[in-house]
Amino acid sequence: MPQPRPGWTTTPLLLLCFVLVLPVLALAASWLGWNAQNADVLRQMMDTVLPEYARTSLVLCLAVAVSVGLVGMATACAVTLFDFPGRRTAEWALLLPLAMPAYVVAYAYTDFFQFSGPLQNWLRGNLGLQGRVFPEVRSLGGAVWVFTFALYPYVYLLARSALSERASHLMEAARLLGAPMLRRVREVALPLARPAVAAGIALALMETLADYGVASYFGIQTFTTGIYKAWLVMDNRVAAAQMATLLLATVSVLVSLERHAQQRLRFNTVSGQGRGSRDAQPQVLRGAGRWLAWAVCGVPVLAGFVLPVLFMLRPLASGWDELPWSAFWRWSFNSLWLAGLGAALATAAALWLAFVQRRQPGWLTNGAVQLVSLGYAVPGAVLVVGLLLPVGWVQAAAPGASLGYWVTATVLGLLWAYLVRFTAVALQSLQSGYARIPTSLDDSARMLGTSGGALLARVHWPLLRGATATAALLVFVDIMKELPATLVLRPFNSDTLAVVTYQLARDERLGEAALPALTLVLVGLLPVVLLSRTLRRRG
């Protein structure tokens, strides 16, 4: 059967790939012009701020890695290996912190537990205490707490999937051989879930390194806050580019570790499938074991979702009559139309990439798709520097060029950033959809004279509507919550809910910040509900 000619897709594919990876290429190109001035800037940073950025980021990542690993693995074991009243509810409730942006959790805890917050004021007034009652919330320890209970679902989801595949029947076999419970968990469940836990920890660390809202609000000197300070405060593009490159290199290592762990996870899953996994039942807990399971599953949900929502509802209710409703509707409109347009463009680009990869699975196509799929791992701060660097080079070479205006004064620059970062999210969903469509349908369609765009429109599209809608929803919610790139690249008078939440919280107007923050939480619940339904159907 004659194969379709690749000429009509190769050039657009390369152009799209170039546009989406240009920020990374710009960061790499910034080192080509290395000179004595750049070396002096790097030497000054190494003598002053760089060791502090590296130390803080390292301590934060190590603490978050241990914490999310423990919480995610404990919750996954509880709902997978054991049976207790409320287990089905805990399975989906443990996903709720995915709806909470980490910076919203940080604002909620700060408002309630800070020195002038309602809890410390009540304790001092009723118990006669003096001074500070609790440790400072805005600290490295506070950031670890926030990231732990905002990001543990990454580990929980992957570990739960790994354990549900084959842990139950192997645990049953170990029980029949006389192994006690602790030994079964230590020597059977933990080794099975180790690749999944490693992959989840890598994802959580990528989110931690990419964060700007929590680190900036808590005053923590991480690489991300250092990049913004170098670019916006010190007006030093060289220093910002160098720190962005170091951060991108760190994230690249995490991406490679995550992919390696995912490959091991797939191998373990495939090799461990057997008949007995469906017949084995979780062990029923009674007495103290039941209370322990409730605590293991209840504390993360309380700390990561229920308490932050309650803390934000308190100032919202007390200042209800003073809320800026007219401004809120304007912020909501800006968020909705930017997220809608960005989701439509990212989903369309991902659909075309997935179709080209399906139609012409060569090394060029696969390599281009692999590069694009790395976009989500690029932190927002790195993305901003990578986008603005080539704009600065063009303006320096041609002062009369209007590229700077189109990128920074219109929504084009912001949409470009959204495409670079979130096309990978839509691409993953569409690739999963294509995996469920047999290639024999393509062969049959070609034999009947249908190829090219008609193949996509008449054969693939009816079967991809669900995957496309899921991809668009995920990208829409991610754009609604996105802060670092939107904060810098948004046009004048185009504040979004995420940006306004950050600005109001930074100005200590947490009562006014509660309304846009809780709106973001409600929007974030949409993919959580979708994910919960998907997992329940698979179960």
Image: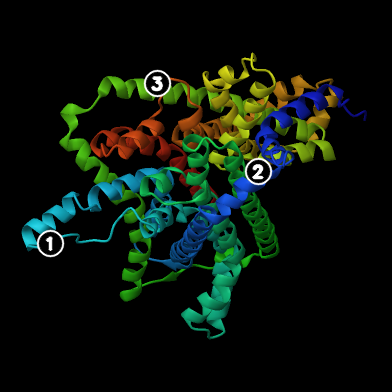
Tag 3's secondary structure?
A: helix
Residue 50 vertical placement versus 37 (above, below): below
How many C-alpha atoms fall within 10 Å of the one at disc 3: few (<14), some, or many (≥20)?
some
First in sequence: mark 1 vs mark 2: 2
Q: Quadrant of residue 348?
A: top right
Q: CA distance from mark 3 to mark 2?
A: 43 Å
Residue type at mark 2: give it: Asn
Viewer-nearest residue: 192 or 334: 334
Looking at the image, the residue that sits furthest to the bottom is 178
Whether the residues at callouts 3 and 1 have beta carbons within 8 Å, the answer is: no
Residue type at mark 3: give it: Phe
Q: Position of residue 515 (x, y in %)?
A: 29, 33
Q: CA distance from mark 1 to mark 2?
A: 51 Å
Viewer-nearest residue: 118 or 525: 118
Tell me which colouring the rendered structure shows: rainbow
Residue where numbered disc 3 is placed = 333
Residue at position x 28%, y 49% from top?
Answer: 110
Apparent side of residue 321 relative to residue 26 in the rendered image (left or right)? left
First in sequence: mark 3 vs mark 1: 1
The disc at residue 38 is 2
Residue where numbered disc 1 is placed = 130
Residue 253 vertical placement versus 501 (above, below): below
Residue 140 visible in the picture = yes
Apparent side of residue 381 relative to residue 500 in the rendered image (left or right)? right
Residue at position x 39%, y 58% from top?
Answer: 140
Q: Position of residue 462 (x, y in %)?
A: 64, 26
Apparent side of residue 434 relative to residue 184 in the rendered image (left or right)? right
Looking at the image, the residue that sits furthest to the right is 2
